[in-house]
Amino acid sequence: MDRVWKLKLIGVILVFTIVGMYLYPTFSNLDVQNTSFPIKKKVNLGLDLQGGMYMVFSVDIQRVFKESLEKRAATIAERLEKEKSLKVTTSYVGDAMTLSDDPHVYFSGDAGALGALKEMLATDYTEILVIQEEPARLETSFSWIHRQSLQERTLDQSIQVIRNRIDEFGVTEPSIVTQGTDRIVIELPGVSDLDRAKSLIGRTAKLEFKLVDEEAMTKTNLGEILQAAETDAQIKFEAGKSFLDYVERVNQFAKGKIPEDSVIAFERNSGDQVQNVATGIPYILKMRTEISGDLLRDAYVTFDQYGASQVAFKLEPTGAADFAALTEKNIGRRMAIVLDGIVHSAPNIESKIPGGEGVITLGRGNVDQNQTLKEANDLSIVLRAGALPARLDLSEQRVIGPTLGADSISKGVTAGLIGCALIVIFMIFYYRVSGVIAVISLVLNASMMIAILIGIGATLTLPGIAGIALGIGIAVDSNVIIFERIRDEIHEGASIVGAVERGFDRALTCIIDSHLTQAIIAIILLSFGTGPIKGYAVTLLISIATTLFCAVIVAKLIFDAYIGLQKGTKKMSI
């Protein structure tokens, strides 16, 4: 054996030593959390193998359009008054007459103000179109291009926020993809606490600081308005339904009964769950959000003097300065801390609050402290991960039990063992000793594929198993090509050593050509496919690489060793 062969042998031994180290934790069922073994990774099983949760959330894009347009209109009106001393009023309407299913805003004012407004829109706010012009008002809406951009950005931001939350929740290899124009599909393998996962993912966590409208609270009988909403308009909150929808219907009923720039909100009673928040304290708040959660730097769980869990938060420097200015300007007034449309507290501003720090209380008194602590932990995760840009509504949920995954694994293993057994029998029967070499190469090939999947942290799914099975088939095909080429060389009178050398060399072009075409298909599937298709493409690409290594290098080394042991022989078992 020459020096090059020995170097190749050392390299192959080193490679498969590493492969064995990656396979050991999985096949020995090693507790990777409490071991000194250097490799602490196992095969990640997908949703279809280990069970878990499948959810489809609908994104409320129309609400995003509405809130974005309202904020933009308010900014434009303020700028017009500040820069040109011209005043316009804004009013929102849900469905435009000329652009179906699209919210729009009316700007009302005199001819001079509307003329200046049109000029401002044309130069600085090209995303807002004037769709109808009347003597005393303009009907405006977002352009189609801006709506499309806003929709795509909302979906992208939602996926990023959901991924951040799931990462903190500790789910291994989640799948989060868009479906259509307004849906997000989430797969969580191995999740057991389903209710907590749904709550954590779907919470909007929109943190706002709003001033209480003290004048309206004094002059308005909120109890009468809520009673009339329930009796006259049949607006009642039903457990299990969206509380935000209930609040929105109450505010629609209250139009004209409270100031236009104010809204009704509720603070839940201590110990109440969210679904019972309608029994809490009603407030009239200024519609304007003084400080938003976008300026949040950090959120974490703390405990008050009574041992109750609460969430402390810190604002970014810009937010801290705004918070200090806001509290200094409104000493003596109440400021509501609003989370997801629910008032968590409305403390009185006693003095200027520098530093931008505060707390969100989660209830005191006769409450379940363990449940409150879990809620505080989840809330801190949600706030740290960021606020969802849109409300998510759960459209579909399927819980896949681990028994289905176990059944799939069992049947997959059975099918794989039967297939492998048939291949082994055929290769040994047809190619004899060379068939044994091929079987050794196949075993090493399959081991290498699984080790690479573990190393890159890929999730093994049923399509992935199909990719591995196809990879083994490709490896068998490569061995057959090599063996038939060696047979041809022997029939043409070549020596055993020369037949093996030329057989491997001349088969290489055909093997590379077939693998290259399969790799192109796999890359296309990986680029344009999603979910299971990508998993299949990944395992197929890995199998192509490992097959080339095992069929061309490993099998050749074994052949050389076999020939070396048969010195002087003129026959070969093939």
Image (spheres, rainbow, N blue to C red):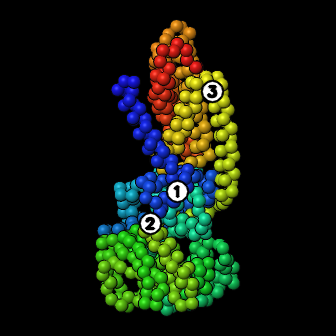
Q: Could you say which disc has been placed on residue 21 in the image?
A: none
Specify the label residue 386 is tagged with: 2
Q: Secondary structure at mark 3?
A: helix
Q: Earlier in the sequence, mark 3 or mark 1?
A: 1
Q: Which residue is mark 1?
A: 30
The alpha-carbon separation of the residues under discs 2 and 1 comes to 36 Å
Q: Earlier in the sequence, mark 2 or mark 3?
A: 2
Residue at x 66%, y 40% (from the top left corner): 417
Give the label on residue 428, or none. Answer: 3
Residue 395: x and y, percent?
Answer: 64, 61
Q: Height in image: 414 above or below 402?
A: above
Closest to the observer, 396 or 504:
504
Q: Position of residue 163 (x, y in %)?
A: 49, 59
**Whether residue 193 is visible:** yes
- Residue drawn at point x = 66 percent, y = 27 percent: 426
* Alpha carbon separation for disc pair 2 and 3: 60 Å
Type of amino acid at the residue the image marks with label 2: Gly
- Which quadrant of the structure image shows residue 3? top left
How dense is the environment of label 2, judged by Cα within 10 Å: few (below 14), some, or many (20 and up)? many
Circles 2 and 1 in contact, beta carbons < 8 Å: no
In what quadrant of the picture does the N terminus appear?
top left
The amino acid type found where label 3 is placed reads Ile
Q: Dot 3: within a 10 Å radius of its alpha carbon, few (fewer than 14), some, or many (20 or more) residues?
A: some
Q: Secondary structure at mark 2?
A: loop
